[in-house]
Amino acid sequence: MASILTNTSAFTALQNLRSINTNLVDIQNQISTGKKISNARDNAAIFSVSKTLESDVAGFKAISDSLNVGDATVAIGRQAAETVSDILTELKGNIVAAQEENVDRSKIQADIDAKVDQIQSIVSAASFNGLSLVQGTDDVNILASLQRDSSGNVTASDISISRRDLTTQAGSLGTGAGLTDLSSNITASSLTLSANAVRDDGAGTAADITVGDDADQDEFSFVIDGTTISFGVGELSDTGAAAASEIADAINAAQITGISVTANGDTLEFASTREFEDILVDGTNTGGNSSLTADVTLGERAEAFTLSNVTVNEGDGYQVSLGGGVVATYVAGANETIEDVADGLALAVDSFNDSDLTTQVVNDGTNFILKVDNAGADRTATIVANNDVNENAVVTGGLAGLDSIDVSSNESADSALKNIDVLLNSALDAAASFGSDQSRIALQDEFVTSLVDSLRTGIGALVDADLEAASARLQALQVQQQLGVQSLSIANQSPQSILSLFR
């Protein structure tokens, strides 16, 4: 049935042309934008995923900036620690030179003081945007990554950078009812420091050797710290008392450092002022006519505080009181050990530059032992330890005691030589730690850069248009459009054929 009111062919041709035009617009949009999905209408699910990934890319760009700032901050801390290490090495050279008595120690001290001022200036200036890694003890967190779980929740992860305090700040114990006594970690909490302690068993008993009668009929030999004093047959008197006096005179005449002996009847009473060294007195006689007691050991003059090798927490405070106004305090920082505590206490005692006091730290294989020697009048020594749970203690600086280094006397120069290695190790540890942190940051930054590239590739795979395919598709649609227009034109001419029926 022919009709001039309803042209089915035209409807069909028009519908096809509209579809072609719609597809043509889509292809043209892809070519102009470069994306096959440019809005949620194109594909809501893919569009949502791509936008989420794009937000992650923006976040990782910010993380990269954070890592760059962190790297610059750590670099300044590392450079400061390395510079301080170099200056401390030079300062050690000054201290070594001061060991020689025939030098101008006042000039050496002036050079040391100048270097100490320079170190303090470097530490105070070593900050980036107001943040210093060589002052204080709190960790610094650098934003390092974002983590998105399967539920879409996002969490941030950090790289934690430990500050390495290189200040000369003295520590102070916390106060308040929250303090927990840690003195059970110390073997001896109260000792008497005697000026000339003489011990053979560590209990304060005299170190004696008794010489019997008929000494003139025997050969005697005494070996003390590598020095041998000997007597042949007939060189000593026949009685024990007289022989003991002759032996004492000979040993004293040998001038063995720190060793003296007194004859008390037939008994030889040995004394040692050696600071940190036990001395064996090996006495023998050949012939057997005179009796001679066994060998004796002269105990070191120093007294010892044994610190148990336990976990040390930040804020734990240790304090040694040695009389005469000497109260040495050490408050542990983060990640420190009992060895750090022992070294810190020794350095704190030495910082008083008391010529009568000398310290030494040794490791007996299990614990660390703080030894304190006293060359002056008897004094009482006590040590206390507390855990500052109220967190109001002042942590001891990593270079505490540096500003008290003194080489004006033999004793202080010896202490300075011992302590400079502890201070130098603190600076070297800081430099090594910061160097390791920089490597971590660099690796993380490289990973973030690679991750961003991967995310961008993934986003592109989801939303980017295939322009080669789009070009071919565009040409095909343009041909279809032309054919559709031609088809619609033919369909529109169909009603005109009805006119011929009325002619």
Image: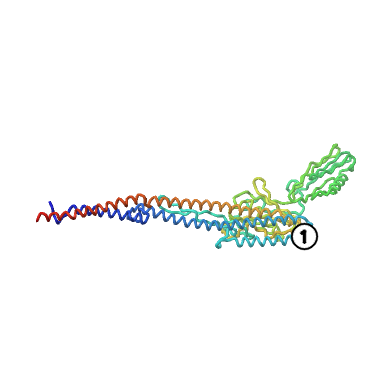
What amino acid is found at the position of numbered circle 1 in the picture? Asp
Q: How many marks?
A: 1
Residue, far front:
503
Judge left or right: residue 407 versus residue 15: right
Q: Quadrant of residue 74?
A: bottom right
| Element type at mark 1 | loop
The one nearer the camera, 36 or 43, is 36
Number of other residues with Cα within 10 Å of mark 1, as a class: few under 14, some 14 to 19, many 20 or more? few
Residue, far top:
287
Q: Which residue is label 1 attached to? A: 104
Quadrant location of the C terminus in the rendered image: bottom left
Judge left or right: residue 310 versus residue 500: right
Judge left or right: residue 106 versus residue 484: right
Residue 167 is at least partly visible in this image: yes
Judge left or right: residue 74 versus residue 284: left
Residue, far left:
503
Residue 315 is at least partly visible in this image: no
Q: Can you give x and y, in whole percent of width and height, for residue 114 in the image?
A: 69, 62
Q: Can you give x and y, in whole percent of width and height, for residue 285 in the image?
A: 84, 39
Q: Can you give x and y, in whole percent of width and height, for residue 44 in the image?
A: 34, 53
The one nearer the camera, 11 or 471, is 471
